[in-house]
């Protein structure tokens, strides 16, 4: 049922409507998101004095801590327990920084909009219920049951899917590709991890899928970020959770960069098996170079000379990545040096060659334009094909998400704008490998 919010007569949001001519530059995204993260947690924890203490002069004249409390508690009275704050967005307008956060509760989600002046004081507050489909509703079917869990130091939201009508089942932990991704690995109109979780559950296999840290808490981004900060530590926590609460027979399914990481994850956590979906044992910098080269070739807005200059800059960046040492501090290709260095921890080729003897399944779509059949899949086969524990399978016409091409002949991310689905035969192959 759609809900509406009844505000006090002075409406808290009114201060956000005032702007000043000739305002100074607004807070940076990093500054504003840090303030908003703190203020949202204060609201959730009922520390109204702390939030009201950050009001600037204009809003403080209209709203005090008591009024803030009355307004907030009228909104959350039926919301249930707090789960997490996600979907943090930033924009600047007329010298103000506007941060919107979706606070998810058991029964609903609430959009909190905080407006900051250039000194970091709160200029406006606005609460509204999020659309009903913005909060994840665990699914309960004849085949499987879902529940939401909070995992790890930062209480990242995860969905645990367990099959019904069986008790002795294995569990897979799903690891997304690069970037800030939700637990469904949502890409455009598609949710590949949700489809995998449900499809595998119908085959008697449980799963744990988890928000990436910087998706749920972007305020934790910093200039010395490593893969351990970004997702590896949280995946290890998810594995610990799976072993303690779901099944001791744990597998890892990694997609794209998650596929690159899967061998290291399995080695460190004594897992039963590995599925690499569109993974690679090459360096991420090599993938970046290939992707940029292909993108440049498809562009017509640059002259040949301009393309050569851009490509040369990328090639120089890749060379700089390979030359990094532990003492390096400057970002390369817009990515912190420490992040590039931490990628070396994955050591996928060496681990698969010399250290990992559990079953490994390597999957690839022939229509993938982000990870390549020749340079990645076929290269892995040439290097690792002699190992009896590693098997390989390619799917004709499937893209990077292991879905049929929706736009044949188009090799860019507009391919993912249309809703598509993972074919049943892919899920069948993964299930057969695991069981």
Image (tube, rainbow, N blue to C red):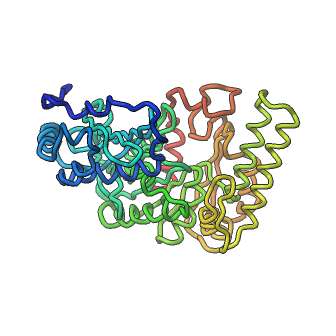
Where does residue 111 sit, x and y in percent of width and height? 29, 37
- Choose between 308 and 114: the one closer to the eye: 114
Image quarter of the N terminus: top left
Total label count? 0
- Choose between 48 and 358: the one closer to the eye: 48
Q: Is residue 152 left or right of residue 407?
A: left
- Choose between 346 and 116: the one closer to the eye: 116
- Choose between 267 and 391: the one closer to the eye: 267
Does the rendering let one see residue 104? yes
Q: Is residue 280 left or right of residue 140?
A: right
Image quarter of the C terminus: bottom left
Q: Is residue 78 left or right of residue 323?
A: left
Q: Residue at x 77, y 28 (%)?
A: 301
For the view shown, which residue lies furthest in the front direction?
22
Where does residue 73 sit, x and y in percent of width and height? 13, 42
Q: Residue at x 29, y 56 (%)?
A: 167
Where does residue 307 sit, x and y in percent of width and height? 82, 38
Q: Residue at x 85, y 41 (%)?
A: 308
Q: Is residue 32 left or right of residue 399?
A: left
Q: Residue at x 32, y 29 (%)?
A: 17
Above or below, comparing residue 428 to residue 419 in the picture = below
The image quarter in which residue 318 lies: bottom right
The image quarter in which residue 413 lies: top right
Does the rendering let one see residue 141? no
Where does residue 397 sit, x and y in percent of width and height? 65, 34
């Amino acid at each position: 049922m759609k809900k509406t919010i009844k505000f006090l007569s002075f409406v808290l949001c009114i201060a956000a409507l005032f702007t000043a001519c000739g305002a100074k530059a607004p807070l940076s995204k990093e500054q504003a998101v840090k303030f908003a993260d703190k203020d949202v947690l204060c609201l959730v924890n009922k520390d109204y004095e702390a939030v009201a203490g950050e009001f600037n002069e204009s809003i403080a004249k209209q709203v005090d801590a008591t009024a803030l409390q009355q307004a907030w508690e009228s909104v959350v009275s039926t919301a249930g327990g707090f789960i997490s704050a996600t979907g943090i967005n930033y924009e600047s307008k007329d010298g103000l920084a506007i941060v919107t956060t979706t606070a998810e509760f058991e029964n609903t989600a609430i959009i909190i909009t905080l407006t900051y002046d250039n000194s970091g004081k709160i200029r406006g507050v606005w609460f509204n219920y999020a659309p009903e489909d913005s909060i994840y509703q665990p699914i309960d079917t004849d085949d499987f049951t879902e529940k939401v869990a909070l995992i790890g130091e930062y209480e990242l939201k995860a969905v645990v899917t367990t099959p019904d009508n069986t008790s002795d089942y294995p569990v897979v932990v799903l690891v997304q590709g690069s970037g800030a991704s939700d637990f469904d690995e949502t890409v455009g109109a598609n949710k590949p991890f949700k489809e995998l979780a449900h499809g595998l559950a119908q085959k008697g296999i449980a799963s744990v899928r988890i928000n990436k840290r910087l998706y749920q808490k972007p305020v934790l981004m910093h200039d010395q970020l490593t893969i351990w900060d970004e997702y590896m530590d949280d995946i290890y926590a998810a594995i610990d959770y799976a072993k303690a609460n779901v099944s001791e027979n744990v597998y890892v399914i990694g997609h794209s960069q998650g596929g690159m990481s899967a061998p290291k994850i399995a080695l460190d956590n004594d897992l039963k098996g590995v599925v690499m979906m569109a993974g690679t044992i090459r360096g991420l910098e090599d993938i970046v170079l290939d992707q940029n080269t292909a993108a440049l070739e498809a562009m017509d807005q640059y002259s040949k000379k301009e393309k050569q200059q851009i490509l040369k800059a990328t090639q120089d960046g890749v060379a700089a990545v390979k030359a990094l040492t532990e003492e390096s501090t400057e970002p390369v290709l817009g990515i912190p040096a420490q992040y590039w260095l931490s990628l070396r921890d994955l050591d996928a080729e060496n681990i698969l060659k010399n250290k990992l003897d559990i079953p490994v399944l390597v999957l690839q779509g022939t229509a993938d334009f982000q990870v390549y059949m020749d340079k990645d899949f076929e290269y892995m086969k040439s290097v690792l094909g002699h190992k009896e524990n590693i098997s390989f399978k390619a799917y004709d016409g499937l893209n990077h998400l292991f879905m049929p091409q929706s736009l044949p002949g188009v090799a860019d991310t507009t391919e993912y704008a249309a809703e598509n689905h993972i074919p049943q035969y892919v899920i069948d192959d993964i299930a057969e490998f695991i069981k």
